[in-house]
Image (cartoon, rainbow, N blue to C red):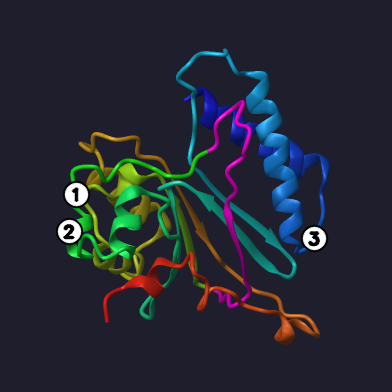
Amino acid sequence: EVASQTVSQSLGEWYSSNVTHSFEKEQVEDAIAFAYQKLDEKDSDALRKMGTTLTLLYLGNKGIVAAHMGDSRIYHIRPKEGILYQSRDHSLVFDLYQAGEITYDEMRNFAQKNIVTRAMTPGADNRMRPDIINITDIKAGDYFYMCSDGMLEQMNNDELLALFSSGISDKEIREKLIQATRNNQDNHSAWIIHVKDVTCENGDESLVNEEPIARCNAINMLPK
């Protein structure tokens, strides 16, 4: 709780003091370095360190920069079309799947599915770094959904897509998510970002969209 609050507040502080429309991944890295500094200041020197996962979206005039660490997720959903991006969990279960030790279906109920392999912790000699990508294929009506893993205990991707494609209001989507996760055991926090309008400028067509080919896009790991 302390770690997640510290990181969230410090990232907000950094971006408030460094207002920019730039579209550079380096700025995300600078913001996270600042958050690590603030996290160190809260360190109690306990043997067992606090830690937090991370999801971050920076919306600029050249698109979106998405960064994540751990098993909290970022989704880019285009209603009626599908899920364009699902951030790849930094977790033991995903590593085992990639190594061929377990199947895709076995990941959901694997006994050690909550063990993360990347997180933000204070006092680390080697700072864990997030996966960062640029997203420029954005259309009016798209959703970006950021959530902790507890939101997904009782809901799979097909159900998530169906909900966001149902045509109901954002308020109704929010209420249905609350109802679906009411009895979940793990932390369940989320943000829904609904893209209402997109303005294109000269030269935007040349911007690189890393979403379809990104190694951190879990959609690219679905079994064929």
- Please determine whether, in this image, residue 194 is positioned above or below residue 220: above
Residue drawn at point x = 82 percent, y = 45 percent = 18
How much space separates mark 1 and mark 3, taking CA atoms? 42 Å
Q: Which mark is residue 150?
A: none
Which of 95 and 193 lies nearest the eye of the viewer?
95
Residue 37 relative to residue 50: left or right: right
Residue corresponding to mark 3: 21
Which of 5 and 192 lies nearest the eye of the viewer?
5
Give the residue type that dot 3 points to: His
Whether residue 160 is visible to the viewer of this picture, yes or no, is no
Residue corresponding to mark 2: 106
In terms of sequence position, does the residue under pointer 3 or pointer 2 come before the other?
3
Residue corresponding to mark 1: 110
SS type, badge 1: loop
In terms of sequence position, does the residue under pointer 1 or pointer 3 come before the other?
3
Give the residue type that dot 1 points to: Phe
Q: Are marks 1 and 2 in contact (CB under 8 Å)?
A: yes
